[in-house]
Image (tube, rainbow, N blue to C red):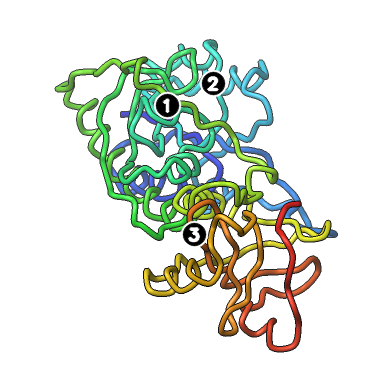
Amino acid sequence: MKIVFMGSPDFALPSLQRILDSDHELLAVVSGEDKRRGRAKSPTPTPVKALALEQGIPVITTSSTHDPNFIESLTKLNADLFVVVAFKVLPPSVLELPKIGSINVHASLLPKYRGAAPIHWAIAQGEEETGCTIFFLDTKVDTGAILCSHKTPIGATETTGDLYHRLKHIGAEALCEALAMIESGDYDLQPQDERLATPAPKVFKQDGQLDFNQYLSTLYNRFRAMTPVPGAWVSLDGVAIKIHSVVVPSKEISMELLQKYPISSTEPGQLITENGQLYSACLDGFIRVHMLQFPSKNIVKTSDYLRSNRLEGVLNT
């Protein structure tokens, strides 16, 4: 098949590599425009564009999928299939171009977690399983008919960063299966059940603020979901402190803390130092803050910080 691949971040790289290694004809790669990654630095290409150029594949860059020049460039390619991984929403004028259609690699088990941040919200909601879904794009976001999906368990301590790196390879595997199905013509499309649909909107910095007026499991899931991006954080006396690592205490330690600091008389967010470790109260127990970072400072273990400093008060008040 004659394929045009669309993507920008490193999540798309394993899928692009699978197409490069296949017998399919990769006509071109579409990616976002070059961006400056730091002050005084020259614009750098997206990971997808960089790999395409390295392999000698023609690259089309765009900031708008509605640009008439962009659409004309795609029309001239006369592709059989568009493969989209972590890219922009495509308008009908683009979706109608390829002979077979456009498929997408999505990092959830659709119809659950439609949107820009499926990995974040699957972890935040305490899901024990997720995966990647390959589906045909239509005019609405993540609603098209499903070709296939590959499932994987979510580890009890996995962060969004951990799961992101696993799912990009699982998505590539699922894409290989989907391309084989399309090429053979031997497949049945599965419509999505709208009753099971859940949203997964883009996450922002404010989503990373940890709320201690919650149960321990909910709090821990939110920390995992927002790590490493956009980052978990708390506010103490008006100072935003990044939280890089937390630990759920053992049952023995939890019981000792609860006996000494009953939940009924401990305010959510209350900081407690015990045996050189820092804990914060939530609705049904305590979570240990293992690594933190003050503004313009290095990441530090709280146990090291507490050797020469005090941390006390109530978080986010």
Q: CA distance from mark 2 to mark 1?
A: 11 Å
Q: Residue at x 27, y 34 (%)?
A: 149
Question: Mark 1 falls on what kind of element?
Answer: strand
Q: Residue at x 67, y 25 (%)?
A: 64
The amino acid type found where label 1 is placed reads: Phe
List the residue tagged with mark 3.
285
Q: Residue at x 49, y 27 (%)?
A: 199
Q: Quadrant of the N terminus?
A: top left
Q: Residue at x 72, y 47 (%)?
A: 35
Quadrant in which residue 138 is drawn: top left
- Is the Cβ of the residue at disc 2 closer than 8 Å to that at disc 1? yes
Residue 82: which numbered mark, if any?
1
List the residue tagged with mark 2.
90
Label 1, residues with CA under 10 Å away: few <14, some 14-19, many ≥20: many
Locate residue 120, reporting x and y percent: 50, 44
Locate residue 225, reporting x and y percent: 51, 49
The amino acid type found where label 2 is placed reads: Leu
Judge from the rendering whether residue 273 lies leftward or rightward of residue 174; answer left or right. right
In this view of the protein, which residue sits in the foreground, 58 or 175? 175
Residue 296 appears in the figure = yes
* Mark 2 or mark 3: whose residue is earlier in sequence: 2
Whether residue 212 is situated above or below residue 2 in the rendered picture: below
Residue 261: which numbered mark, if any?
none
In this view of the protein, which residue sits in the foreground, 184 or 301? 301
Residue at the outermost left position: 186
